[in-house]
Image (cartoon, rainbow, N blue to C red):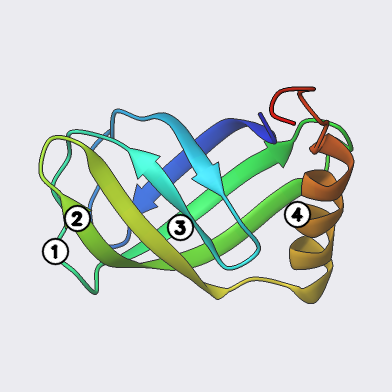
Amino acid sequence: MYFRDLEVVYEGHSQEIPLRVPDLSTHGMFINTPQIFPEGSVLKLKFWLCRSGYEVTARAEVRYCLAEVGIGVEFVEISDEARDMIAEEMEFSDVPTGRGR
């Protein structure tokens, strides 16, 4: 896992959003949630990277929604430093499993 303590705020709304561990990349993430969001919805995200403890804040736009499964979001406002820290976190967290050949 690359991060912890994910917080999501649906801009213009004040409801709690149930979440499960998402997938993360330097361009966005998949967030497992039963909440349905229309494509184009804007979310404020905040989470901490596990290895470095770096706090990432970003605005993200919902690109697709899979009902009862989750949402794919693209970061639309994120600092270059945060993007670099995510890349570094992923690079140092990629540990070979020893499976395969």
91 sits left or right of 66 in the view: right
What's the residue at 84%, 49% (across, down)?
Answer: 91
Vertical placement of residue 74 versus 93, above or below: below
Viewer-side residue, 67 vs 54: 67
Gap between marks 2 and 3 measured at Cα: 17 Å
Asked if disc 3 and disc 4 are in contact, CB closer than 8 Å, the reply is no
Nearer to us: label 1 or label 2: 2
> What residue is disc 2 on?
65
Vertical placement of residue 57 versus 77, above or below: above
86 sits left or right of 46 in the view: right
The label shown at residue 38 is 1
> What residue is disc 4 on?
86
Residue 38 sits in which quadrant? Answer: bottom left
Helix, strand, or loop for circle 1? loop
Residue 27 position within the rendered picture, expressed as x and y whole percent measured from the top left: 58, 68
Residue 61 position within the rendered picture, expressed as x and y whole percent measured from the top left: 36, 70
Specify the amino acid type for callout 2: Cys
Nearest to N terminus: mark 4 or mark 2: 2
> For the residue carrying disc 4, how many other residues have a C-alpha within 10 Å: few (<14), some (14-19), or many (20+)?
many
Asked if disc 1 and disc 2 are in contact, CB closer than 8 Å, the reply is yes
Nearest to N terminus: mark 4 or mark 1: 1
Quadrant containing the N terminus is: top right
Q: Residue furthest front?
A: 101
Specify the amino acid type for callout 4: Ile
Specify the amino acid type for callout 1: Pro
Gap between marks 3 and 4 measured at Cα: 17 Å
Viewer-side residue, 4 vs 28: 28
Gap between marks 4 and 1 measured at Cα: 26 Å
Gap between marks 4 and 2 measured at Cα: 23 Å
> What residue is disc 3 on?
44
Residue 43 position within the rendered picture, expressed as x and y whole percent measured from the top left: 38, 60
